[in-house]
């Protein structure tokens, strides 16, 4: 993670029909649209909310909301408002069409002469000159929705071009509304359903009515699911609801990429639902048959079941079709396979099987799909790369050309999950025999010792490339998320490294190790591995500064059980608990005045939209990573349960979606986009389970190689600190 999770080179992918056309459909936040920004020069006026365009649910085309553009244009002044196309992880914009389309609703008649002007730009910064929003019409009638269709050629035909046009409509990245003529009057315009469309397509036929709608009541929300439509030009589904006999209301729009929706209505309520399908020409199907259900307040164990099941869906419903493995990010490329995230997902699969979210037969089939894919996938000295193409099993060098080889950290993450599964799938059947035999084969083929660089190397290295060898040259030095690499490398029965590397590399005291810690932590506190300082009243044995983000306490401990043992430096269960309590105390203190932080809303960790790994407050941008506190359930069960209840029952529909809790949210910036990450959803599933039963810890520790490794390193029993908080 420290290497740079968020500095990615986009990779072209095949996008869905929805993503090829939709620019704005609705806002995840109620107050403002995150993917926008506005500026105004007085005495002109532009209504903004935290510097962004406000959202309204008074009028809309695609429920539940639309954008509210309210302005006054005055002589000599200016205003401008920018809509940005939301970025999708590792995917370039690939919009298809020749026309900019949007629905507009004017409170009063809007004349073309005083309408805002509009211009567009692509992701490279190339833009086209501004034209009137009402180009081609005299006015916009009041109090009715009107669809504006602006040919992209209309921008090219505008006067003022002094250079050849280099704008690429496929990579359109922003739409900018700017002040028009200075009439000095207040205007209000509601804007919705902004798209790029194809003027040659004029389909008048409505898509088929969705089938198979199912409603399942949970604690405070209803889970909806349905069968996918087959139309190639399907844009979205619309959800309609009636609560306890009230009138039907449109409540949500779901991209055609998904056939699920989570609707928050509160506990102990009955609701009925219908859905429709909408195509690219706004043709809407008849409504589906009705599905009804009732919410019911759950006790603590019921809540934990619900959260585990919801987050597990990421690895079951949303897995890559060909490989069965976890996607790196949703929304993102449907073929970008995350090795580490898949390893964590395997641990989540074990939990789901044990708790009967899926059948053992289903679980066995998925494991075999994953293992058969891993056997044929690219490996380098037995080590998989960070990312694979789910269609081919070939390396996907997302971080750049030098990252086209083996990634020892991601391999350790997936091997931790595989060794856990090897113990779980212990049935006397041909298929479970194949699971165990294949895992053992893959485990034996990992050449951990190769990643010493030299036969006498005192530290392990993260990457090796067949073309660039050790060019990246990133040493694995703790404290961070990579402890499991050394544990497995020492445990290997076929390509082990000497146990001394644990203390020369992971807990190293060399100049290389100290400088490495300085490089990412920017502090001397803990730069020799040991720390010994107290933060917010919590003593930290190991870690740089305040210890780093909470994924440090999770990634190496999904299988490895730190309870009741210690090395020369600490009991890691206790150290992880201290780190979690420091993280919580920091959020309560909230020195940067981030919105929402408190005793029941904490958890800073690497994820989408967040920092990544540094001691706080350096990387605190206001983003709470949902898996941070929830993945710490084994260490802070009471505090984590309070967070879970706050997240679910108070923030509700803002941060819970079809795959459980979103990856994160930022109340300061009003960022509540529905995004999920393979590295993080499993932390919730597994963290809760290890708190409840210790299942994954027990399974992984049954591997004889692990027990041998503990003795080689010198772990000893330690009951000096309470293991049960």
Image (cartoon, grey):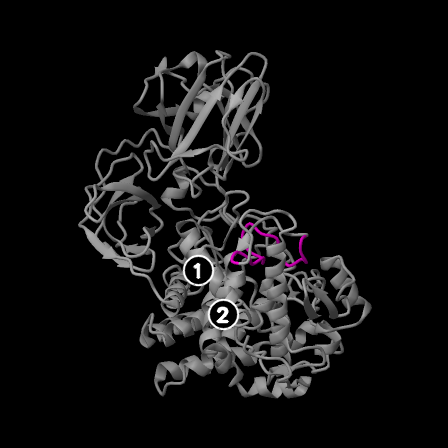
Quadrant assignment for the N terminus: bottom right
Q: Is residue 177 left or right of residue 305?
A: right
Does 602 appear in magenta? Answer: yes
Main secondary structure found in the magenta portion: loop
Pointer 1 residue:
645
Mark 1 to mark 2: distance in Å? 16 Å
Q: Residue 15, image x and y in percent?
A: 42, 46
Pointer 2 residue:
687
Residue 188 visible in the picture? yes
The span shown in magenta is: 600-617
Disc 2 crowd, CA 10 A, few/some/many (<14, 14-19, 20+): many
Which residue is farthest right? 511
Residue 612 visible in the picture? no
Q: Residue at x 58, y 58 (%)?
A: 605
Q: Which label was assigned to residue 697?
A: none
Q: Is residue 142 above or below residue 469?
A: above
Does 278 appear in magenta? Answer: no
Q: Residue at x 46, y 47 (%)?
A: 673
Q: Residue at x 54, y 35 (%)?
A: 50
**Nearest the eye: 659 or 92:** 659
**Which quarter of the figure has residue 68?**
top left
Q: Is residue 290 left or right of residue 416?
A: left
Q: Is residue 524 left or right of residue 427?
A: right
Q: Residue 409, image x and y in percent?
A: 60, 68
């Amino acid at each position: 993670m420290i290497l740079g999770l968020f500095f990615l080179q986009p990779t072209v992918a095949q996008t869905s029909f929805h993503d090829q056309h939709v620019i704005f459909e609705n806002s995840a936040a109620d107050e403002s649209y995150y993917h926008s920004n506005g500026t105004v020069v007085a005495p002109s006026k532009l209504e903004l909310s935290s510097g962004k365009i406000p959202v309204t649910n008074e009028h809309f085309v695609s429920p539940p909301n639309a954008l509210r553009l309210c302005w006054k244009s005055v002589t000599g002044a200016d205003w401008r408002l920018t809509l940005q196309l939301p970025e999708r992880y590792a995917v370039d914009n690939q919009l298809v069409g020749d026309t900019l389309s949007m629905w507009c609703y004017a409170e009063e008649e809007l004349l073309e002469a005083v309408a805002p002007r509009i211009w567009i730009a692509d992701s490279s910064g190339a833009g086209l000159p501004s034209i009137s929003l009402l180009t081609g019409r005299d006015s916009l009638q009041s109090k009715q929705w009107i669809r504006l269709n602006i040919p992209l050629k209309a921008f090219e035909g505008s006067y003022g071009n002094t250079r050849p046009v280099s704008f690429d409509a496929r990579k359109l990245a922003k739409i900018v509304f700017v002040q028009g003529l200075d009439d000095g009057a207040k205007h209000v315009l509601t804007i919705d359903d902004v798209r790029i469309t194809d003027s040659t397509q004029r389909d008048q036929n409505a898509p088929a009515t969705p089938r198979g709608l199912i409603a399942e009541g949970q604690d405070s929300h209803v889970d909806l699911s349905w069968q996918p439509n087959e139309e190639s030009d399907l844009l979205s589904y619309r959800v309609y609801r009636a609560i306890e006999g009230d009138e039907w209301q449109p409540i949500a729009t779901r991209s055609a990429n998904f056939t699920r929706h989570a609707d928050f209505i509160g506990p102990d309520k009955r609701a009925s639902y219908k859905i429709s399908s909408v195509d690219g020409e706004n043709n809407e199907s008849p409504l589906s048959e009705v599905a009804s259900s009732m919410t019911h307040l759950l006790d603590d164990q019921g809540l934990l079941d619900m959260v585990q099941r919801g987050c597990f869906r990421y690895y079951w419903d949303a897995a890559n079709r060909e490989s069965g493995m976890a996607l790196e990010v949703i929304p993102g490329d449907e073929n970008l396979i995350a090795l580490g995230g898949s390893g964590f997902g395997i641990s989540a699969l074990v939990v789901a099987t044990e708790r009967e979210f899926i059948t053992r037969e289903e679980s066995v089939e998925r494991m075999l799909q994953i293992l058969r894919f891993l056997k044929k996938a690219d490996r380098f000295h037995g080590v998989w790369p960070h990312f694979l193409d789910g269609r081919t099993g070939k390396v996907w060098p997302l971080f750049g050309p030098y990252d086209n080889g083996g990634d020892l950290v991601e391999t350790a993450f997936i091997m931790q999950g595989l060794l856990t599964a090897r113990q779980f799938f212990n049935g006397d059947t041909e298929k479970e025999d194949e699971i165990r035999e294949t895992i053992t084969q893959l485990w034996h083929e990992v050449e951990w010792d190769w990643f010493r660089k030299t036969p006498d190397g005192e530290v392990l290295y993260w990457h090796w490339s067949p073309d660039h060898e050790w060019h990246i040259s990133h040493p694995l030095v703790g404290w961070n998320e990579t402890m499991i690499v050394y544990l497995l490398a020492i445990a290997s029965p076929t390509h082990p490294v000497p146990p001394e590397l644990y203390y020369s590399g992971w807990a190293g005291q060399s100049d290389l190790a100290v400088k490495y810690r300085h490089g990412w932590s920017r502090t001397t506190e803990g730069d020799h591995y040991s720390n010994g300082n107290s933060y917010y009243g919590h003593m930290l044995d190991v870690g740089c500064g305040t210890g780093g983000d909470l994924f440090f306490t999770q990634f190496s401990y999904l299988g490895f059980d730190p309870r009741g043992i210690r090395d020369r430096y600490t009991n890691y269960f206790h150290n992880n608990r201290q780190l979690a309590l420091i993280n919580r105390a920091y959020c309560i203190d909230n020195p940067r005045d981030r919105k929402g932080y408190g005793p029941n809303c904490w958890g800073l960790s690497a994820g989408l939209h967040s920092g990544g790994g540094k001691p706080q407050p350096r990387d605190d941008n206001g983003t709470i990573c949902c898996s941070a506190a929830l993945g710490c359930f084994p260490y802070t069960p009471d505090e984590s349960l309070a967070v879970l209840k706050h997240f679910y029952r108070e923030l509700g529909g803002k941060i819970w979606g079809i795959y459980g809790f979103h990856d994160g949210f930022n109340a300061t910036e009003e960022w509540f986009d529905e995004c999920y990450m393979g590295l993080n959803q499993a932390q919730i599933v597994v963290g809760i389970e290890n708190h409840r039963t210790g299942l994954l810890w027990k399974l992984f520790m049954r591997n004889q190689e692990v027990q041998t490794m503990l003795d080689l390193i010198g772990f000893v029993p330690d009951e000096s600190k309470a293991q049960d908080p």
